[in-house]
């Protein structure tokens, strides 16, 4: 349990003041593999200035005990920047229901770095996110996803064509017209269109079996293996079909998302170098394709040598990544090492997409603890604001607020 | 993790499940529809030694004992232990009241979530106070079993929020059972689910209304007028045509049924409190209450509870202003604050939801102890459901609804080790004792074989 010098921490945590120097006494420092060591650090605006076994507190610095220092978290599945509110209004770009295109739709074109949810979510220590589209009617292909940093700046799309997103399982079945067979037929036909792009579309834009020319071109990067194909799938039998696709198309770089029943076929997943994004807290048979959902799914994957990352797929709302660390902590309860759990929401997904940004997050305790929160952050040496719309609302209505003017004037 | 002696369960316990459907005989049985057949499982008299006790009243006892006798709490802290009582050294573990979730759709939106299982919303009219959630509850929802393993001993199942008057809610013991009557909390008051805001106007906007918040309010008032007239007829005692829809509303006016109202926005909650004044009824709890923090003093002044999430929001416009400190801010104003799940996953970890919002509140400058914050998990939900005299705290004479924890309940890494209803252990992580829904059979066997 952390013991904080609350007065000094609160003084700056509640206000967006920059040029704040912290002296971290006996901080827990976590490396890229999730291994821990102890050190003293001097941190200014989220940037580590000095780190050694023992340091003296510089004058004017706020002293913090019990702090943890880690890299930023990477949310491997989100709809960040695509929606302002989940339902009941325009401005929800998570899926296109009536478009003429599919794979060639890039979420990077929808992504709004100024979304207030970027600020809100960054307050939970997340510095990077995968942003994925969802499929619309008529196609199992949701589009092309992006990797973003949570700076809120207009250059925060790091990879605009990061992966191609496909939905199989019950959703894909619905999109394809009503059966798993239809969804798989669509996927195989699309792979053939993309693989044979130069031959099929040389003479006519309608030369493909199922994809239009621009969609086949967009998919071609995934079928060549230049970018991953991210496939949403839960049922073990469906995962085996995806593995069959991989066996037939060795160049494909497949990441499966959901994977509720992955434990049943963990060895096959590992043997075919398929990576997995799962929710470690998924344990209910919420659908017939996830009747095998169980909390120790992750341990089967770990023991089989599968490369995995964590998401909080079951959590509600457009701010999906916010409780990422809590979900990773659930894997620790199931027996996964703390280091593996932490890496699964930071270095591992970052490495999948070659993200090498330097990030630092100073926490007031174990980042996987629900009671912990970041107190200072930086991305590539740039301090990150610790304010957000949520915190502005909090401060206006805080019962400790001594401002007695009407709320709209506070 | 150190192990400790498992509670010894009589072999008859599981067999006794077969005999639980004996109706309770009460004096007005003839008038009670769907009476509870809940019967506690047999339990041993036992004293839990060396417990770290959070009692739900406001106290944390660092090292104390809890006596369980005849399924009730004998004493908390220290007291005389009758000869022959079993003794269990819990070795410093947290011992807390069982968790109570005031807002669940387990059973009426069960897993698997197929269309055929959608029994939580009677989406045929904005006024359906004649329906009751208990008639849509499937007791085989595997979610009940998982919630039990998360320490939930009592839960309140509500109709959904499509309608202005959605129907009656029912309070259930989280007792594995074949029937909903076998779970019904004996003599717990019914509640009436009502809904504000976006849902009713969205659902009925193209089906005759309400199509706006204005229509919502006129819909409430029109029906309270009818209910007032119905109640006057009923109070006269002569002949009158029984009307299930108005009966529920009249019972609200009589104070027999508690209003649990889905409402997000601060301004709307205040409008509702005015309607309650106009027709002289009480809103017991606002549910979701994402903006409760904006009107916390008004909630305190009107003795209205708020059931909230820790950090959910922005899934629609009326939840846009969510903050992570909602629960502690409402608490700090002296109002009755509590956590709720409204979700089959979060109900398994309500302690973590409280831990999050508790820590965020203290980070914002409040100074709330764990013992105080625990009230958001059991005490205040029990109060808002009208069952606080029976459960919700560890106090002598109450039902022994108890959770013994592995680790700290205010932690990601803490989880229930044993869960008791009326002193009977229904979940025991160490012995593997846990209920298994009929739905899990076959699938579960396959799971075990694959290990």
Image (tube, rainbow, N blue to C red):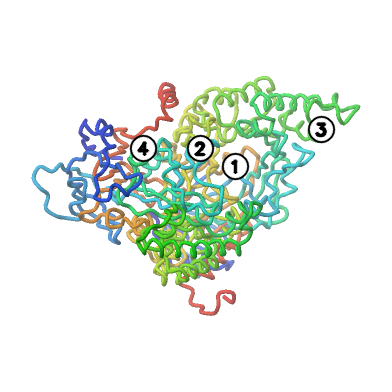
* Mark 3 → mark 4, Cα distance in angstroms: 55 Å
Q: Is residue B388 above or below residue B433?
A: below
Chain of the residue that carries numbered disc 2 in the rendered image: B
Disc number lying in front (3 or 2): 2
Q: Nearer the viewer, residue B417 or A222?
A: B417
* Mark 1 → mark 3, Cα distance in angstroms: 29 Å
Label 4 packing within 10 angstroms: few (<14), some (14-19), many (20+): some
Q: Which residue is mark 2?
A: B117
* Mark 2 → mark 4, Cα distance in angstroms: 16 Å
Q: Which residue is mark 3?
A: A212
- Give yes or no for contact between labels 2 and 1 (Cβ–Cβ under 8 Å): no
Q: Which residue does the image show at 67% across and 25% down from the upper left? A: A184
* Among the two numbered marks 2 and 4 on one chain, the one whose residue lies closer to the N terminus: 2
Dot label at residue B179: 4
Q: Which residue is mark 1?
A: A76
Task: Decide if residue A120 is on the left or right side of residue B297.
Answer: right
- Element type at marker 2? helix
């Amino acid at each position: 349990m952390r013991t904080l010098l609350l007065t000094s921490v609160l003084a700056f945590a509640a206000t967006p003041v920059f040029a704040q120097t912290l002296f971290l006494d006996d901080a827990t420092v976590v490396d890229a593999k999730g291994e821990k060591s102890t050190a003293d650090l001097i941190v200014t605006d989220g940037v580590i200035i000095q780190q050694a076994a023992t340091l003296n507190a510089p004058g004017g610095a706020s002293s913090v005990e019990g702090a943890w220092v880690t890299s930023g978290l990477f949310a491997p599945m989100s709809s960040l920047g695509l929606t302002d509110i989940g339902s009941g209004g325009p401005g929800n770009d998570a899926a296109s229901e009536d478009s003429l295109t599919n794979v060639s739709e890039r979420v990077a074109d929808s992504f709004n770095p100024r979304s207030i949810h970027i600020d809100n979510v960054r307050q939970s220590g997340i510095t990077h996110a995968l942003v994925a589209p969802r499929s619309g009617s008529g196609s199992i292909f949701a589009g092309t996803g992006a990797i973003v940093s949570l700076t809120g700046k207009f250059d925060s799309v790091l990879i605009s064509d990061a992966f191609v997103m496909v939905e199989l399982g019950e959703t894909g079945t619905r999109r394809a017209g009503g059966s798993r067979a239809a969804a798989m037929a669509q996927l195989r036909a699309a792979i053939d269109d993309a693989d044979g792009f130069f031959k099929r579309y040389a003479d006519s834009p309608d030369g493909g079996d199922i994809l239009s020319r621009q969609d086949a071109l967009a998919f071609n990067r995934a079928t060549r293996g230049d970018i991953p194909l991210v496939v949403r799938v839960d049922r073990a039998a469906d995962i085996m079909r995806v593995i069959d696709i991989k066996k037939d198309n060795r160049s494909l770089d497949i990441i499966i998302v959901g994977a509720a029943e992955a434990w049943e076929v963990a060895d096959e997943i590992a043997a075919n170098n398929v990576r997995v994004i799962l929710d470690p807290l998924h344990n209910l048979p919420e659908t017939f394709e996830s009747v095998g959902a169980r909390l120790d799914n992750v341990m089967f994957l770990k023991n089989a040598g599968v490369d995995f990352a964590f998401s909080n797929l079951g959590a509600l709302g457009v701010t999906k990544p916010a409780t990422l660390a809590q979900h990773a902590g659930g894997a620790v309860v199931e027996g996964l090492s703390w280091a593996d759990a932490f890496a699964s929401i930071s270095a591992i997904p970052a490495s999948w997409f070659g993200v090498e940004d330097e990030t630092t997050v100073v926490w007031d305790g174990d980042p996987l603890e629900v009671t912990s929160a970041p107190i200072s952050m930086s991305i590539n040496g740039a301090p990150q604001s610790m304010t957000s719309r949520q915190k502005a609302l909090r401060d206006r209505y805080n019962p400790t607020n001594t401002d007695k003017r009407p709320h709209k004037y506070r | 993790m150190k192990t400790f002696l498992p509670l010894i369960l009589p072999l008859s316990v599981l067999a006794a499940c077969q005999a639980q459907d004996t109706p309770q005989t009460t004096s007005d049985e003839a008038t009670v529809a769907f009476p509870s057949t809940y019967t506690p499982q047999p339990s041993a008299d036992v004293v839990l030694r060396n417990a770290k006790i959070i009692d739900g009243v406001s106290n944390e006892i660092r090292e104390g004992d809890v006596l369980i006798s005849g399924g009730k709490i004998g004493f908390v802290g220290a007291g005389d232990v009758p000869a022959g009582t079993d003794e269990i050294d819990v070795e410093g573990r947290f011992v807390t009241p069982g968790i109570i979730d005031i807002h669940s759709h387990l059973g009426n939106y069960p897993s698997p979530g197929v269309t055929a299982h959608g029994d939580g919303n009677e989406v045929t009219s904005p006024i359906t106070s004649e329906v009751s959630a208990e008639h849509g509850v499937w007791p085989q929802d595997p979610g009940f079993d998982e919630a039990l393993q998360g320490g939930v001993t009592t839960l309140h199942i509500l109709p959904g929020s499509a309608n202005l008057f959605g129907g009656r809610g029912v309070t259930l013991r989280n007792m594995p059972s074949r029937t909903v009557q076998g779970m019904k909390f004996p003599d717990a008051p019914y509640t009436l689910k009502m809904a504000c805001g976006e849902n009713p106007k969205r659902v009925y906007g193209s089906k005759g209304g309400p199509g706006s918040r204005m229509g919502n309010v006129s819909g409430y008032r029109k029906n309270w007028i009818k209910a007032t007239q119905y109640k006057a007829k009923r109070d006269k005692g002569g002949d009158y045509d029984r009307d299930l829809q108005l009966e529920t509303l009249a019972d609200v006016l009589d104070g027999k049924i508690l209003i649990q109202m889905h409402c997000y926005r601060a301004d709307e909650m205040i409008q509702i409190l005015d309607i309650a004044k106009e027709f002289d009824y009480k809103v017991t709890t606002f549910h979701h209450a994402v903006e409760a923090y904006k009107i916390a003093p008004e909630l305190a002044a009107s003795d209205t509870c708020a059931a909230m999430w820790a950090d959910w929001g922005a899934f629609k416009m009326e939840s846009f202003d969510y903050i992570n400190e909602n629960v502690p801010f409402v608490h700090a104003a002296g109002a009755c604050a509590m956590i709720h799940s409204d979700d089959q996953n979060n109900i398994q970890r309500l302690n973590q939801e409280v831990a999050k919002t508790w820590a965020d509140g203290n980070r914002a400058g409040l100074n709330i102890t764990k013992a105080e914050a625990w009230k958001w998990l059991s005490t205040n939900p029990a109060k808002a459901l009208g069952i606080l005299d029976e459960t919700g705290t560890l106090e002598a004479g109450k039902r022994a609804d108890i959770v013994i924890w592995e680790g700290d309940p205010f932690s990601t890494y803490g989880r229930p080790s044993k869960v008791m209803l009326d002193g009977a252990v229904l979940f025991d992580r160490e012995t593997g004792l846990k209920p298994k829904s009929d739905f899990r059979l076959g699938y579960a066997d396959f799971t075990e074989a694959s290990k």
